Amino acid sequence: MSKNNNQNQDNINGENNQFESESLREEQGAAAAEKIEEEMGEAMTEAENQPEDEVAALRKQVEELNADVAKEKKEYMFLMAEFDNFRKRTLREKSDLIKNAGENVLKGLLPIVDDFERGLQAAENSSDSQGVKEGMELIYNKLKKYMEQNGVKEMDPADDTFDTERHEAISVIPVPDESKKGKIIDTVTKGYMLNDKVLRHAKVVVGQ
């Protein structure tokens, strides 16, 4: 019986302690809220009591900042318009450059075409095959020189190292010499480079 009384007393004490803790938390929360309200009130009062000259200074600063923003925006819009004009002008100049470059190359070929036409006319009325051959060689050399001036060069015919970046193997033939395997045996069609770029792959026969 005494044991039950003690247990009941412990339960009552626990409930009292819990009630006291909750009450303490409520009091602490109320005190914190009251302190915040007091601080807010003080801040508002302080703001209301700001001197008029400070308020005027702040207003002036805001106006200056707004003016700066408007100025920066105007300059930004101006720069955007200038950049757009520059972009369009650059594209137009690039297009004209490509067009005129092609035009100039074709224009440079016309005198060589004229030489061919004169050579063909002379060959019709000439029995001197050697003279015709020499004339054709002169025109051919003139054409090669013109191509070199525009960055077009034929690949080195003495280079017998097969390179898939520059050559196209159209056939392979067996070779008795081991040193000739994988090497270029014959060039069927010459390859050409435009500066450092392959303009046309050389068609070659490779030893196997």
Image: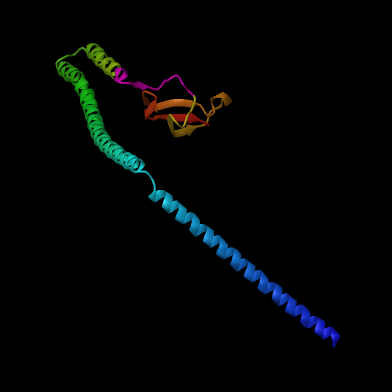
Label tally: 0
Seen in the picture, residue 172 relative to 180 is either above or below; the reply is below
User: x%, y% of residue 131?
Assistant: 23, 11
Was residue 67 drawn as part of the magenta stretch in this picture? no
Seen in the picture, residue 125 relative to 198 is either above or below; the reply is above
Q: Give 120 or 35, whichever is nearer the viewer.
A: 35
Query: Residue placed at 43% from the left, 30% from the top?
Result: 167
Q: Give 114 or 46, whichever is nearer the viewer.
A: 46
User: x%, y% of residue 150?
Assistant: 30, 20
Query: Residue placed at 21% from the left, 21% from the top?
Result: 109
**What's drawn in magenta, residue-wise?**
147-160
Image quadrant of residue 139? top left
User: x%, y% of residue 123?
Assistant: 18, 17
Q: Is residue 200 left or right of residue 134?
A: right
Query: Residue placed at 60% from the left, 66% from the top?
Result: 27
Q: Give 13 or 64, whichever is nearer the viewer.
A: 13
Seen in the picture, residue 104 relative to 10 is either above or below; the reply is above
Seen in the picture, residue 150 relative to 98 is either above or below; the reply is above
Query: Residue placed at 23% from the left, 29% from the top?
Result: 93
Outermost residue, bottom direction?
Answer: 1
Q: Is residue 94 left or right of residue 170?
A: left
Residue 190 visible to an observer of this rendering: no
